[in-house]
Image (cartoon, helix red, strand yellow):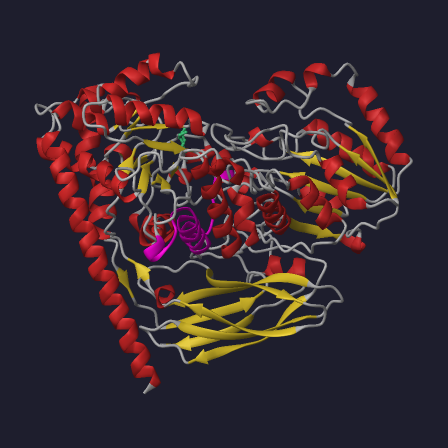
Amino acid sequence: MKKVFMLSCLIFSLIVVHAQEEDENQAMNEYIHALMSKMTLEEKLGQLNLPVSGDIVTGQAKNSDVAAKIRAGKVGGLFNIKGQDKVREMQRIAVEESRLHIPLLFGKDVIHGYETVFPIPLGLAATWNMSAIEQSARLAAVEASADGICWTFSPMVDISRDPRWGRMAEGGGEDPYLGGRIAEAMVNGYQGKGKLRYKQDSNIMACVKHYALYGASEAGRDYNTVDMSRIRMFNEYMYPYKAAIEAGVGSVMASFNEVDGVPATANKWLLTDVLRKQWGFNGFVVTDYTGVSEMVDHGIGDLPTVSARALKAGVDMDMVSEGLQTLDEGKVSQEDIDRACRRVLEAKYKLGLFHDPYKYCKSAEAVKNIFTSEHRAIARKVAAESFVLLKNKENVLPLKRQGTIAVIGPLANSRSNMVGTWSVAADLDKPMTLIEGIRSVAGNNVRVVYAKGSHLMADEMNEKNATVFGRSLGREREKRTDEQMLAEALKIAGESDVIVAALGESSEMSGESSSRTDIGIPEVQKTLLRELLTTGKPVVLVLFSGRPMTIGWENENVPAILNVWFGGTEAAPAIGDVLFGDVNPSGKLPVTYPQNVGQIPLYYNHKSTGRPLAEGRWFEKFRSNYLDVSNDPLYPFGYGLSYGDVQVEKAEFAKAPEKEQDAEIRVTVKNHSEVATRDVVEVYIKNQDSKYAPVNPALCGFAKVSLEAGEEKELTITVSKEAYKVVNDEGEKIFDSSSSVLFVGTNGPDKRSEALTGKVTKQLVINW
Ligand code: BGC
């Protein structure tokens, strides 16, 4: 009876919500219809224009070129402006001085936080904590919206299996399922979910990017060509974009690369057939920066031609090229222009800008919500959760709170290097340096000493290119020779009890246009590390990185390695928290670490070949392998150590799996250590005897769990019925396996994970 009552209540509330939505849509349609009937062709094209605004100087903005365009109704939005006052001034020009008073959209690359910066997205992915990721997006929206921004160019969900590509740092790594969950969490965080979407003043519109397949740029070279089968596309690379659409993302950014031989920006199949017709996307599509004009260099026509192709394919807003501006009814139909204009206006309407154009830049009070101690405390927790303990021989970590710690390395004494790539709103002077972070956590019984020890790179010009955008590591001020720097480092190392070596990549060695062919630690730093090891003191490598790095030698020789990515504004104290064991490391790799660059692309859920190599073998003639290196990764996907010891004691179906129903797995986990800890329970699936050759066990569910010392817990993990299906080359989901095996553990079901962790996954078999 109670169930029937609850069901009736649910149905009733669904009907009410649906009716409300219908009313809202009708009101929006009427409003936009009335507005568009007053618009000239030029004004409609103006809404499709997202020009570059340059640095806007408050007070002088009204005399700028962009202000003249706004007055003439030739601008739909502006982007990457910082400051509520600047936004307000430009919005005032739009709503007071243009003929139809249409408000502007203000976009920005709020990628992993605003002024309070969270770990780079690859680091966020390593937390495997979806509520933490959603919260990071929420707080980013709270800060950005307080400063006038209503639209973020995030989440970036490009699957990437090539760590040469610098932009791997900006996404969730190599796995479709993990990437999909992250996409969903971030969209919900920015926009607000369900009925609350855009309802609070701090909800901003998200933009999922870069649609599609940008992460598969050939040879990891940025902006390069992509070519891929539809099967791989639909089953793997498309999954996170689709998850963002299903979560209701308001906008989509087209990618620079081509898909099926046509640049994404002009690809009708991609932007209309799949995105809108198959997936039901109803927001608007923006190009990437100069995405339209770059198609001239792709070689598919002059600016008017490529602009027309973009609009007809499904682009609604043109970032920077101003190509769509040149269109007229001779090149495209009125219907094409109206469609795009309507979509941009709808986004403004949904955000509430017609109701209140100053919604996001109303009060001086709001900016008090930026970089607050509360936000920073959360960012510190999330940062600590993102670090991955790759090695910890003889429990070098956690460090003891006594004696002398030598913090050595070119990345130890920098503030600007901590936040990571794409932190355009951050104040680079605010983060603590690693030395300060360690000191702030160490307590009074520890002496922390420092030496730089080496440059970032031997070559000055290379270092300059890798420390752009105000991220210099002070080389220009360095008066000492390399030998003198090394000698100083060895001297203090010799007088210390333990060495913390802060090495790896600078923050601008990953991100856009930061591809590398050698993804190791730069040689000059490796020399320093080698010398530090000769002192015989225990060495902890604190590895800064925006991608998996080839650190086979370091893995062999350094007793402890903590990968800290770029942890954001609070990275330094968070590193201290983990080094001293106040926080137990619980990050797990969202990407595979190759042994060398020649193995790339190397990822865990690859296909089996017809000539697989037998387990445990390195080389066998006429098998799929290399002469010079085993097929194993250095560190596998899903791997990460902690100071605790969590085991999966038992895994069973909570209810018997059925084809068209989600399965529920009941998992018992126990912490066998004497410290409180967190871990991730990972579930992988392998479907057998399908029409298409299946991939190796692929992630299909996970849960992050906290456990006190000695605690045992039972948790339920849902495996979606979608996990048993594949998507065919038409993009349709089909079920065609005869059996499936589920693997449950705290790491992946592969030999390398087992060897590194000593933990074997449990198996559950389903015969369909
Ligand atoms: C990047 C985008 C970014 C845009 C706007 C482009 O270069 O590819 O990810 O959102 O610039 O700054």
Check the picture and name the quadrant holding the C terminus: bottom left
Asked where in the image residue 214 lies, by quadrant, the reply is top left
Give the magenta-colored segment's residue range: 169-196
Find residue 565 and report its horizontal and vertical position in percent. 60, 41
Number of marks present in the image shown = 0
Q: Residue visible at 17% across and 25% down?
A: 43
Above or below, comparing residue 437 to residue 705 in the picture: above
Looking at the image, the residue that sits furthest to the right is 495
Majority secondary structure of the magenta segment?
helix
Judge left or right: residue 270 versus residue 479.
left
Q: Residue visible at 34% across and 35% down?
A: 255
Q: Is residue 590 visible?
A: no
| Quadrant position of ligand 1 | top left
Q: Residue visible at 50% across and 40% down?
A: 112
Magenta stretch contains residue 130: no
Q: Is residue 651 visible?
A: yes
Judge left or right: residue 504 versus residue 591.
right
Residue closest to the eye, 701 or 685 = 701
Check the picture and name the quadrant holding the N terminus: bottom left
